[in-house]
Amino acid sequence: MSVLNLHPQLLMGMPNAGELVITLLIIVVLFGSKKIPELAKGLGKGIREFNDAKDGIKSEIESGMKDKEKIQSPNTTSTPSGNA
């Protein structure tokens, strides 16, 4: 499937290089070159905190599932049954 066969509506959401440059210039003008590193640092900190919270919830769910499996399966030692 070539790009020419795609519907024009699908291509409208993709920014080209000129649009990206204009967007970056607007960001620099609005926030200033000194504020951009602070914004990036805050964004990185937020993403890190989100990932930590996500990992914590995932580990809690997994430990809860393991505890549930331990409760459901009785702790019996299996011995080979033989007629002795």
Image: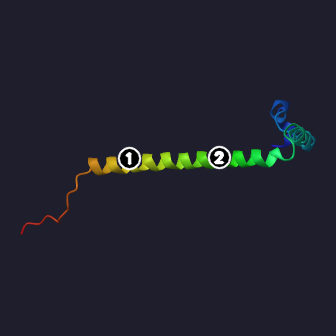
Q: Nearer the viewer, residue 52 or 9?
A: 52
Q: Residue furthest left?
A: 84
Q: Where's residue 32, x and y in %?
A: 87, 42
Residue assigned mark 2:
47
- Residue drawn at (11%, 66%), measured in percent from left and top? 82
82, above or below 9, in the image: below
The type of residue carrying mark 1 is Gly
Residue for point 76% across, 47% down: 38
12 or 15, which lies in front?
A: 15
Nearer to us: label 1 or label 2: 2
- Front residue of 80 and 68: 68
Q: Work out which quarter of the rendered image holds the N terminus and state it.
A: top right
**CA distance for labels 1 and 2:** 26 Å
Determine which quarter of the picture holds residue 83.
bottom left
**Amino acid marked by disc 2:** Ile
- Quarter of the image for the C terminus: give it: bottom left
Q: Mark 1 — residue?
A: 64
Q: Residue furthest front?
A: 34
Choose top left, top right, bottom left or bottom right for residue 42.
top right
Q: Position of residue 50 (x, y in %)?
A: 60, 45
Residue 4, given in percent of the width and then of the height, sits at 88, 39
Residue beneath the point at 92% across and 39% down: 22
- Give the left or right position of residue 19, taking residue 60 as reference: right
Q: Describe the element under mark 1 as helix, strand or loop.
A: helix
The dot on residue 29 is: none
Give whichever of discs 1 and 2 has the lower sequence position.
Answer: 2
Colour scheme of the rendered structure:
rainbow
Q: Is residue 56 left or right of residue 79?
A: right
Looking at the rendered structure, the number of numbered marks drawn on it comes to: 2
The local secondary structure at tag 2 comes to: helix
